[in-house]
Image: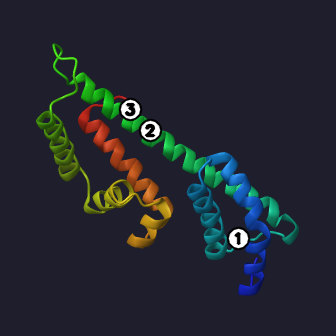
Amino acid sequence: MDYSKQQFERLFKDSYPHMYRMAFSLVENAEDAKDAVHQVFVKLWNGKPEIATESIRGYLLSATRNQCLHILRDRQLQRRLKEELQKETAWQKDEEREEPPAPDRREELLQQLQQVIDDNLTEQDRRVLQLHYEEEMTYAETASVLGISSSAVNKHITRSLARIRETLKIAK
């Protein structure tokens, strides 16, 4: 369906509140909800899928739900990776000591992780991880900075984390 700019703006203004409320109820975070709705409209504008006018509201709500599920999967993956890294750090503690690793041991672990990243990831993979995790950018922001799609950002992150896990022999 081809929209004029005015028609698209009207569709946005009419649909955004419903889409945002649904997204917020799923992701329970205002920024993630806004990102989800934004991604749906970006895809609609760029992809211009063939959707009957009477079906557009259902399409937008379904697409928003799917985008929210993607965000929730990403959160779960990040949470699991963080837990696995914490387990790995705990496992590597000296068995006699009950306190956390010394600062120099933590630094050593971080250096090992950085070495794994440098040795096993492409420059693009490293840049995506840096923007997303260090700069705390969303997938959409990372994609915009790098001039790639959000799905490409997702693929880079997924592939990179898998390589890191494999190299560090962290079980899923």
Q: Does label 3 or label 1 sit earlier along the sequence?
A: 1
Kindly indicate the quadrant of the structure image that contains residue 86: top left
Q: Residues within 10 Å of mark 3 (few under 14, many from 20)?
A: few
Classify the position of the C terminus by image quarter: top left
Q: Dot 1: what SS?
A: loop
Per the image, label 3 sits on a secondary structure element best described as helix
For residue 162, side relative to residue 64 (left or right): left
Q: Is residue 168 above or below residue 48?
A: above
> Alpha-carbon distance for marks 1 and 2?
34 Å
Give the mark toward the camera: 3 or 1: 3
Residue position for label 2: 79
Q: Residue at x 21, y 22 (%)?
A: 99
Does the residue at mark 3 contact the one at mark 1 (Cβ under 8 Å)? no
Q: Amino acid at mark 1?
A: Pro
Q: Earlier in the sequence, mark 1 or mark 2?
A: 1
- Residue corresponding to mark 3: 83
Image position of 168 with respect to 111: above or below: above
Name the side, left or right, on which 54 lies relative to 152: right
Q: Check if mark 3's residue and mark 2's residue have beta carbons within 8 Å.
A: yes
